Image (cartoon, helix red, strand yellow):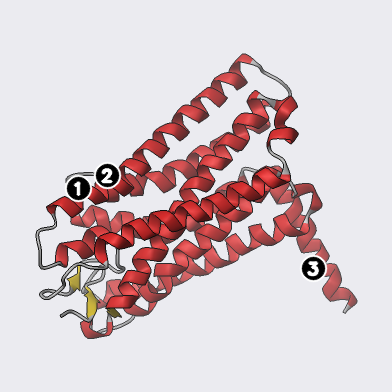
């Protein structure tokens, strides 16, 4: 019986592995710093205590957690010369699958909630404070984590009882269900279909729902122009960009019926370290309130150090 799995990684070239080590390390440091900065800024500035920024802070926490499931292991493995050093235990592999889908499912629900928040704010502004009250926002976040948990349990149920008795090499740098079930000593055709029906259909349906929602919001802005239209468009542009960055790789990994190994690896890297870094950059650069709050936080830190 297989007790551990070996990651084949991204490349066998030592020079390229050094480049990947620097690339992943720099990006992961940026992910930690950028997302924690958003959470700290939203928590410390009273002007940002609104549903949109509350959901944004939750998204940043989810991004940081999602990247931390794979990035640290990826960084240490890239710097390892020998293939036998790039191993993960069977239980550790299942834990990666569980956490990936847990945080991924939570982020999916959070993005839908952020779209709903913008819909209410733009299409029903007079009812916004009533609909998006504090209890509703807390309920949305609890629901996001709860749905993420249920989704991850359903994914883990596919793999936990599979017999693994033969090859144990995963042609990637982390464990994920589509790659792991291919190593099982049984016919996995039905399992592949179930994975597509679970993660793939959920991802595609959520993506279509979000695109329809943002289309309705953009049409509303055009039909009801106001002084705040430019600010609303800027916010929506950031939201739509993040949606595309998150759902694009997910659709190709879980819903595309003809996987391409090289493309899958690129999308896995993009999903693991690029998207979680781009999210805080997009939201801070496109949002004047966030930039103002960060300047005030920086001034407060400078003044605190000067006094001490």
Horizontal and vertical percent for residue 280? 57, 54
**Residue beneath the point at 30% across and 61% down:** 157
**Element type at marker 3?**
helix
**Element type at marker 1?**
helix
Label 3 or label 2, whichever comes before in sequence order: 2
Instruction: Name the residue tied to disc 1.
Output: 193
Q: Are marks 1 and 2 in contact (CB under 8 Å)?
A: yes
Q: CA distance from mark 3 to mark 2?
A: 50 Å
Q: How many marks?
A: 3
**Residue beneath the point at 15% across and 67% down:** 183
Horizontal and vertical percent for residue 209? 44, 32
Point out the frontmost of discs 1 and 3: 1
**Residue beneath the point at 51% across and 40% down:** 112
The answer to whether any part of residue 54 appears in the image is yes
Q: In the rendering, which numbered label is found on residue 301?
A: 3
Q: Are marks 3 and 2 in contact (CB under 8 Å)?
A: no
Task: Give the quarter of the image for residue 203.
Answer: top left
Horizontal and vertical percent for residue 285? 61, 47
Q: Are marks 1 and 3 in contact (CB under 8 Å)?
A: no
Instruction: Name the residue tied to disc 2.
Output: 197
Relative side of 269 to 222, left or right: left
The answer to whether any part of residue 23 appears in the image is no
Horizontal and vertical percent for residue 198? 31, 47
Pick the residue in front: 194 or 230: 194
The C terminus, quarter of image: bottom right
């Amino acid at each position: 019986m297989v007790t551990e799995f070996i990651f084949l990684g991204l490349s066998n070239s030592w020079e390229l592995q050094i480049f990947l080590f620097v690339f992943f390390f720099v990006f992961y440091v940026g992910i930690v710093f950028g997302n924690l900065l958003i959470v700290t800024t939203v928590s410390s500035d009273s002007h940002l205590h609104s549903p949109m920024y509350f959901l944004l802070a939750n998204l940043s926490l989810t991004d940081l957690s999602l990247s931390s499931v794979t990035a640290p292991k990826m960084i240490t493995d890239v710097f390892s010369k020998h293939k036998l050093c790039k191993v993960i235990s069977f239980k550790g592999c299942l834990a990666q699958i569980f956490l990936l889908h847990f945080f991924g499912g939570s982020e999916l629900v959070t993005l839908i909630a952020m779209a709903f928040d913008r819909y209410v704010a733009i299409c029903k502004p007079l009812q916004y404070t009533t609909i998006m009250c504090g209890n509703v926002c807390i309920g949305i976040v609890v629901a996001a984590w709860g749905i993420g948990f249920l989704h991850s349990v359903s994914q883990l149920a596919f793999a936990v009882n599979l017999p693994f008795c033969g090859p144990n090499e995963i042609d990637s740098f982390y464990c994920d269900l589509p790659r792991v079930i291919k190593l099982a000593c049984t016919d996995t055709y039905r399992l592949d279909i179930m994975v597509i029906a679970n993660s793939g259909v959920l991802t595609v349906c959520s993506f279509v729902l979000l695109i329809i929602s943002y289309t309705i919001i953009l049409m509303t802005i055009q039909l009801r122009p106001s002084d705040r239209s430019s600010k609303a468009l800027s916010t929506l542009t950031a939201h739509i960009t993040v949606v595309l960055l998150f759902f694009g790789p997910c659709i190709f990994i879980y819903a595309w019926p003809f996987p391409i190994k090289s493309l899958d690896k690129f999308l896995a890297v993009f999903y693991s370290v690029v998207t979680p870094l781009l999210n805080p950059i997009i939201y801070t650069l496109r949002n004047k309130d966030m930039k103002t709050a960060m300047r005030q936080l920086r001034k407060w830190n400078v003044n605190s150090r000067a006094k001490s």
